Amino acid sequence: MPGPDDLVKLQVAAFAAATAARTPTPGGGSVAGVVGALAAALGEMALAFTRGKKAFAEHEGDYSAIAGRLEAARQTFLGLVAEDARAYEAFQQAAQYQGPGKPAKMKSALQAAIAVPGQMSRQAMAILADLDSLTGRCNKWLLSDLAAGAVLAEAVVRLCDLNVKINAGQLDNQDEGRKVLAQSEDDLAAAGKLAGKIEKECGLRMADSRGG
């Protein structure tokens, strides 16, 4: 089984095979990290084919800032692939530990298992915000890729919500668990709304392009 830091070094076919294998990692959390990196990458690609065109010259300053954020998000997601795998390994070790202080170890492991998808959700929401800002100023031939990036970013939030649900229910502090679940549900609703807005806007612009 590849170690956490080796997961993002795998070729696509090897990563898919590792996910399919009867091993706990990579699992849904690591897959969410890869999907998030691809969401950012699609936004970067849309920008790469838009920047430098005269029709969008007035937006060049914004494009530079957005490109920087998307690249940073892509790298962050790749790092979170390993973080998720490490969090799962720590949880397994805590669950198997039978010595004194086990409750503290379990609490720490659960908090880490919840924190990683929380980070992923926040990154995905930031990507969605940037993609939304590009819908009206994107090369028309890249609108489908922009929308695809939004779909993937929303998928990240959905995947993270699933991970949060399975872990938050194990927290001893029920108030903390309910707070975590409520935040995840809010993120899920916001992501769905924004991704839908981006898809709709891109679809309308693609239709106008075909009509013209």
Image (spheres, rainbow, N blue to C red):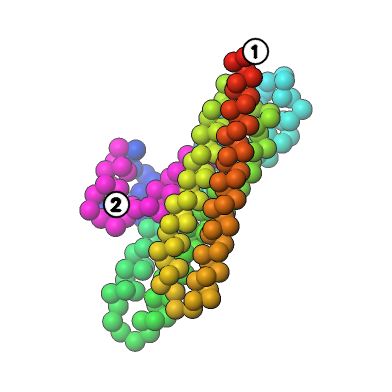
Identity, as a three-letter code, of the amino acid under mark 2? Pro
Query: Which residue does the image show at 33% across and 52% down from the upper left?
Result: 26
Residue 25 is covered by the magenta coloring: yes
Residue 80 seen: no
Is residue 162 or residue 4 the one in the foreground? 162
Residue 93 locus on image (x, y percent) = 31, 71
Residue 165 locus on image (x, y percent) = 44, 62
Q: Secondary structure beneath disc 1?
A: loop
Q: Quadrant of residue 11?
A: top left
The C terminus - image quarter: top right
Q: Secondary structure beneath disc 2?
A: loop
Residue 190 locus on image (x, y percent) = 60, 50
Identity, as a three-letter code, of the amino acid under mark 1? Gly
Gap between marks 2 and 1, in whole Å? 51 Å
Residue 167 locus on image (x, y percent) = 42, 66
Query: Which residue does the image show at 36% across and 63% down from the upper left?
Result: 88
Q: Considering only vertical position in the picture, is 63 above or below 50?
A: below
The numbered dot on residue 212 is 1
- Residue indicated by mark 2: 2
Q: Main secondary structure of the magenta part?
A: helix
Q: What segment is highlighted magenta in the picture?
A: 13-40
